[in-house]
Image (cartoon, rainbow, N blue to C red):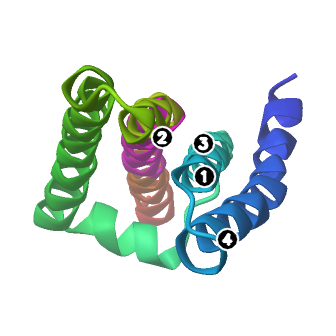
């Protein structure tokens, strides 16, 4: 069952392609906040699926972050503040419906609603980062214990 969720992380790629398409279409080719909102929604879904990856698969870049406490703390605080910022921006977009009280306000309201998956995804990613850090530390402790046992057995 866990393997199913690990493979489910690959669903992020079609959503990323859709997100890029709609964001560019809504920003440059046919300016429209509705298309940007669909792009943000797809990016949030893609970002959420990316956090379903296996915590046992740690990249070299992640190992460098885990090895340095300051880098790990900075990265986790960045994700935490990004989540809070997204909550604030979403609240501002949603309030535009009542402040502007016209079609533009309604489009900003929809854009705010489309930001919710992105907020959830940021916190999912933070959770995955913490889980990877714990796995990395556990693996390193296990290696240290194994090395200590091996060195004691060879010295006898």
**Quarter that holds the N terminus:** top right
Measured as percent of width and height from the top left, residue 146 is found at 49, 51
The kind of secondary structure element at disc 1 is: helix
Disc on the earlier residue, 4 or 2: 4
Neighbor class of circle 3 (other Cα within 10 Å; few <14, some 14-19, many 20+) is many
Circle 3 is placed at which residue position? 41
Disc on the earlier residue, 4 or 1: 4
Query: Against 63, is 45 above or below?
Result: above
Magenta stretch holds residue 135? yes
Circle 1 is placed at which residue position? 43
Neighbor class of circle 1 (other Cα within 10 Å; few <14, some 14-19, many 20+) is many
Asked if the residue under mark 2 is in contact with the one under mark 1, i.e. CB atoms within 8 Å, the reply is yes
Measured as percent of width and height from the top left, residue 133 is found at 38, 47
Asked if the residue under mark 1 is in contact with the one under mark 3, i.e. CB atoms within 8 Å, the reply is yes
What residue is shown at x 19% (from left), y 34% (from top)?
88
Neighbor class of circle 4 (other Cα within 10 Å; few <14, some 14-19, many 20+) is some
The kind of secondary structure element at disc 2 is: helix
Asked if the residue under mark 3 is in contact with the one under mark 2, i.e. CB atoms within 8 Å, the reply is yes
| Relative to 92, 112 lies left or right | right
Place residue 152 in its image quadrant: bottom left
The kind of secondary structure element at disc 3 is: helix
Place residue 39 in its image quadrant: bottom right
Q: Nearer the viewer, residue 6 or 120?
A: 120
Which residue range is magenta in the image? 115-139
**Quarter that holds the C terminus:** bottom left
Disc on the earlier residue, 3 or 4: 4
Q: Closer to the observer: label 4 or label 2?
A: 4
Circle 4 is placed at which residue position? 25
Distance CA(mark 1)–CA(mark 2): 7 Å
Residue 118 - label:
2
């Amino acid at each position: 069952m866990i393997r199913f969720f690990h493979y489910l992380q690959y669903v992020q790629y079609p959503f990323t392609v859709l997100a890029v398409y709609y964001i560019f279409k809504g920003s440059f080719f046919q300016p429209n906040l509705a298309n940007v909102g669909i792009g943000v929604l797809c990016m949030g879904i893609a970002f959420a699926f990316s956090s379903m990856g296996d915590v046992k698969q740690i990249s070299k870049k992640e190992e460098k972050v885990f090895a340095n406490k300051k880098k790990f703390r900075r990265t986790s605080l960045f994700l935490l503040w990004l989540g809070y910022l997204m909550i604030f921006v979403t609240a501002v977009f949603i309030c535009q419906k009542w402040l502007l009280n016209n079609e533009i306000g309604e489009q900003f309201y929809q854009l705010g609603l489309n930001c919710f998956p992105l907020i959830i995804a940021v916190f999912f990613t933070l959770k995955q980062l913490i889980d990877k850090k714990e796995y990395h530390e556990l693996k390193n402790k296990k290696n240290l214990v194994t090395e200590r046992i091996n060195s004691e057995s060879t010295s006898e």
